[in-house]
Image (cartoon, rainbow, N blue to C red):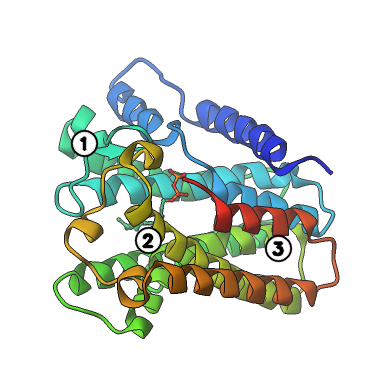
Amino acid sequence: MMEIQEYLKDKIIAIDAKLDQLLPETPGPLLKLYQAARYAILGKGKRIRPMMTFAVCELFDFDDSAALIPACALEMIHAYSLIHDDLPCMDNDDFRRGQPTLHRVFPEGHALLTGDFLLTYAFETLSKAPLLSCEQKIQLVATLATRSGSRGMVGGQAMDIEAAESPLELSTVTQIHQWKTGALLTAAIEFGGIISGASSKQMGVLSAFGNDIGLAFQIIDDIQDVTLSIQKRGRSTPSDVMNKKTTYATLLGLDQSKQIAIQLFDSAIKKLNELNLNSTRLIQLAEYIIHREV
Ligand code: GRG
């Protein structure tokens, strides 16, 4: 089996080439919108969500060609969320993926619309994806809408904004993390199951795995906000840290938070093992998420 770094490099090339093709820089009245979308999405992202979808296809020993367009749709939703999250009305960040945020390079109105464009284009792209049945496409659209909507990413962000003013209980922080960050990662894992034709029992295991890994991902992200330099992170010191927002790290300290992330990882792997499939790639990827340096 290919080493994880090599695997990631190969898949990133495939994703970036498809995104480049889906968002051509065509001269005309929409040139600026497409330029802005390309600036935001073709930046140095880790493409973790697409990798999750591909790795689940590999888990089922299923050819991942059909996963490429759905994986691009996931990246579009992710890019839109980062663009909007960075806007002055939200975190007002200057730096993302090692470059100035979109609204620092393009007019703010264009940045807002670029997020809207990527959000809607994700669903358009998904609905036209080749190599999938109509039923699969409806399942993918429903999963993406649910996981990125009010009981997912948007709901988590809304709770996060409201919570910014006051100290929180651990259970509330957990809920925010699971929705704001975990839900889209879970969707990425569920995408792999839908594309590979997983049974409803297998889908249940995948969703539970995604929930644990998604929460672990955000706990590690909070730890890195405190421990890694802005250069290494490629983004501004988040306003969460500046505002002393409640996180696992502020409530429990760095060591215990890391311990919890590792426990979540172990619990996720245990769940995965119930499937009795070849989970090597998915475990490699989960390890990369837990031990990553950026
Ligand atoms: C604005 C609707 C709306 C939602 C925003 C996801 C989100 C909700 C905001 C992003 C804020 C943030 C930095 C959360 C921490 C976890 C996270 C999603 C980090 C960025 O994801 P990576 O590390 O980024 O996968 P790259 O750049 O590698 O794609």
The reply to whether discs 2 and 3 touch (Cβ–Cβ < 8 Å) is: no
Residue 261 - label: none
Mark 3 or 1: the one toward you:
1
Mark 2 or 3: the one toward you:
2
The x and y percentages for residue 60 are: 81, 59
- Sort mark 2 into few (<14), some (14-19) or many (20+) by Cα contacts within 10 Å: many
Residue at the top extreme?
A: 27
Q: For the residue marked with disc 2, what is the amino acid?
A: Asp
- Sort mark 3 into few (<14), some (14-19) or many (20+) by Cα contacts within 10 Å: many
Mark 2 = which residue?
222
Mark 1 or mark 2: whose residue is earlier in sequence: 1
The x and y percentages for residue 66 are: 71, 46
Mark 1 = which residue?
103
* Residue nearest the viewer, comparing 159 with 140: 159
Image height check: is 151 above or below 112?
below
Mark 3 = which residue?
193
Residue 284, visible in the rendered structure: yes
Name the element at disc 1: helix
Q: For the residue marked with disc 3, what is the amino acid?
A: Gly
Image height check: is 212 above or below 191?
below
Name the element at disc 2: helix
Mark 2 or mark 3: whose residue is earlier in sequence: 3
Name the element at disc 3: helix
Q: Residue at x 49, y 61 (%)?
A: 217
Q: Determine the CA span between mark 2 and mark 3.
A: 29 Å
* Residue nearest the viewer, comparing 99 with 119: 99
Q: For the residue marked with disc 1, what is the amino acid?
A: His
Q: Is residue 267 left or right of residue 254?
A: right
Q: Residue at x 52, y 42 (%)?
A: 46
Image height check: is 76 above or below 186?
above
Mark 3 or mark 1: whose residue is earlier in sequence: 1
